[in-house]
Image: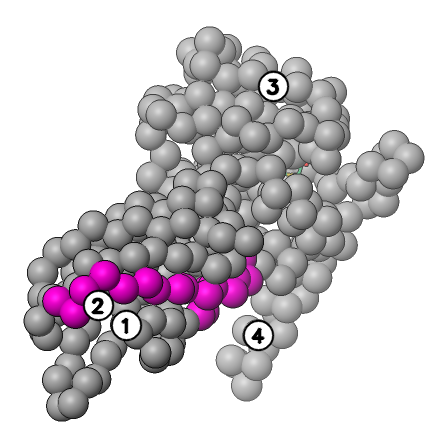
């Protein structure tokens, strides 16, 4: 019974929070989410999870009082940009940055987050409403560079499955709050398509063809070569880094092929490690995507 109450309370809390945050439209066509800050401790924990560092440029879309961007600059040495539709929040952010001594590394702009150029970002933070996140998905997915990390407090981004969903430790928040969650994604490179390469093997030079299908960072596919087709196993796409294995069974002999490489445009460069069989060892792997 206590458990059911807990679940109901937490559902009601989420609903009331969502209702509180979504307050209609401020400007024609510009969705508005009311200002509710992410707790300071959680801001720190989220930036730690993303391993924010001095090479990063952190963008907070709907920045409120600037806390994500200011903390990223003060504690992790990053640069940052915050945008908010509310001029009062931007004035507050600039003053907070000045007081924190990071005004030279951060910038704040009054702007609709849908109009903001986010291509420079290496980390993006969000605390918006689910519908706003859903509408933001195409912009995030198409404009951000592979490898950019996205953190969102409380809400997912439409159908894009996160790499991590973290429940905030009770110790981080006030005892009467139900534990909030946050989500983490790494923007994947475009890996889908047909990739070809040749390899010098113990049986001579051979051509291989990898066909990949992709849904965000999830990939599946197979490799054709020497008259056989093998499904790829343990596929992983993290930013521009692709990895998978192939298992070949041939006349009682088993060989394991571990591929790993980095995607840059239509080229893939990395290595193939073979365990077992006549080609055991490390080999360079270079593939091209073909139309
Ligand atoms: C829930 S608050 C989050 C503030 C801050 N990111 C944080 O986590 O503490 C959402 C913020 O988004 C801003 N906002 C809502 N719609 C926006 C839009 N279309 N463009 C820019 N900012 C927007 C609001 O003014 C508000 O400050």
16 in relation to 250, above or below = above
Q: How far apart in space, not on screen, are marks 2 and 3 (Cα)?
A: 49 Å
Which region shows up in magenta? 202-221
The answer to whether mark 1 and mark 2 are in CB contact below 8 A is yes
Q: Nearer the viewer, residue 281 or 156?
A: 281
Residue where numbered disc 1 is placed: 246
Would you say 239 lies left or right of 126 here?
Answer: left
Whichever of callouts 2 and 3 sits on the residue coming sooner in the sequence is: 3
Question: Is 216 colored magenta in this rendering?
Answer: yes
Whichever of callouts 3 and 4 sits on the residue coming sooner in the sequence is: 4
Per the rendering, the mark at residue 257 is 2
Residue where numbered disc 3 is placed: 108
- Magenta stretch, overall SS: strand
The secondary structure type at the circle numbered 2 is strand
Coloring applied to the structure:
one colour
- Residue 100 visible in image: yes
């Amino acid at each position: 019974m206590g458990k059911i109450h807990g679940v109901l309370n937490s559902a009601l809390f989420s609903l009331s929070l969502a209702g509180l945050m979504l307050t209609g439209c401020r400007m024609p066509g510009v969705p508005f989410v009311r200002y509710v800050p992410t707790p300071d401790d959680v801001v720190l924990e989220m930036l730690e999870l993303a391993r924010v560092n001095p090479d990063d440029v952190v963008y907070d879309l709907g920045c409120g009082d600037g806390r994500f961007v200011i903390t990223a600059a003060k504690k992790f040495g990053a640069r940052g940009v915050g945008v908010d539709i509310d001029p009062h929040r931007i004035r507050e952010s600039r003053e907070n940055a000045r007081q924190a001594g990071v005004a030279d590394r951060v910038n704040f702009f009054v702007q609709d987050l849908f109009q903001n150029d986010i291509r420079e970002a290496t980390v993006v933070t969000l605390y918006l409403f689910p519908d706003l996140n859903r509408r933001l998905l195409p912009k995030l997915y198409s404009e951000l560079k592979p490898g950019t990390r996205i953190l969102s407090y409380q809400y997912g981004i439409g159908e894009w499955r996160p790499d991590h969903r973290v429940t905030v430790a009770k110790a981080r928040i006030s005892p009467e709050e139900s534990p909030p969650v946050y989500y983490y994604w790494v923007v994947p490179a475009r890996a889908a398509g047909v990739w070809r390469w040749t390899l010098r093997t113990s049986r001579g030079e051979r051509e291989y063809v990898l066909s990949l299908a992709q849904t965000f960072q999830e990939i599946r596919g197979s490799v054709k070569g020497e008259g056989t087709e093998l499904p790829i196993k343990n596929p992983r796409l993290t930013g521009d880094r692709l990895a998978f294995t192939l298992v070949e069974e041939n006349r009682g002999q088993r060989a394991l092929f571990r591929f790993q490489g980095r995607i840059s445009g239509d080229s893939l460069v990395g290595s193939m490690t073979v365990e077992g069989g006549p080609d055991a060892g490390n080999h360079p792997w270079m593939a091209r995507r073909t139309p």
